[in-house]
Each structure stands twice: as structure tokens, then as C-alpha cells.
Image (cartoon, grey):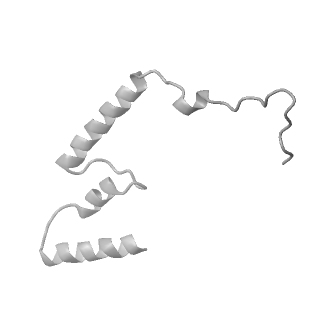
Amino acid sequence: MILQRINLGLFAVLGELSATADWRAISEEIWPFVQGPAATPMGEAEARWRARRQAAAARRPRTTLPWAQYRPSPPPTGVQRPAR
């Protein structure tokens, strides 16, 4: 709700400045829930950067999380765990 008002205010300022661009396409480019295509040179550069990162991540071998190797050890012999 608040972000909608911020966007509306931004569009009002841009309208007063007589700024011209495809503001809808630019908005869809930056809105994470829309995931629109790149509409600006910066958006195109970001798309290439993201593609390179995803490709590099796909080539990296998957490793286990460092804390996954730590498992609780069983209690010493003769010691009972408290009831839950």
C-alpha cells in the first residue's frame, strides 16, 4: 500500500517535469513480482549480469552446508535424556 503511494507520487513528479519514457516498462523491470523484461540499458546490463551469475552457480559443485555435518551425538551410556 505504501509503495503504491510512493510510485504514484513519483509518477506525479515525473509528469510535472514532462519526463518522457515508457515508465510502465521501467516499473515492470524493477518490480520483483512482475519480472518484466529489461526496458533500459541498465536493465539489460543487469540481465546479463544475472545470467552470468546463474551460469556460474550452475557450474559450481553443490556442497553440503557447513553446519549439516554437525549432528547431536548420542548421550553417554547410562545417561537418560529428559522426557519431552
**Residue 24 percent across, percent down from the top left:** 29, 62
Q: Residue at x 84, y 34 (%)?
A: 79
Q: Quadrant of residue 72?
A: top right
Which residue occupies the extreme front position in the image?
A: 78
**Residue 73 percent across, percent down from the top left:** 72, 29
Quadrant that contains the N terminus: bottom left
**Residue 66 percent across, percent down from the top left:** 52, 30
Q: Is residue 50 left or right of residue 63?
A: left
Nearer the observer, 59 or 78: 78
The number of numbered discs placed on residues in the rendered structure image is 0
Q: Quadrant of residue 12?
A: bottom left
Nearer the observer, 14 or 66: 66
Q: Residue at x 32, y 73 (%)?
A: 6
Q: Is residue 13 left or right of residue 27?
A: left
Q: Is residue 47 left or right of residue 76?
A: left
Nearer the observer, 50 or 80: 80
**Residue 81 percent across, percent down from the top left:** 83, 39
Q: Residue at x 35, y 51 (%)?
A: 36
Q: Is residue 77 above or below residue 46?
A: above
Nearer the observer, 13 or 75: 75
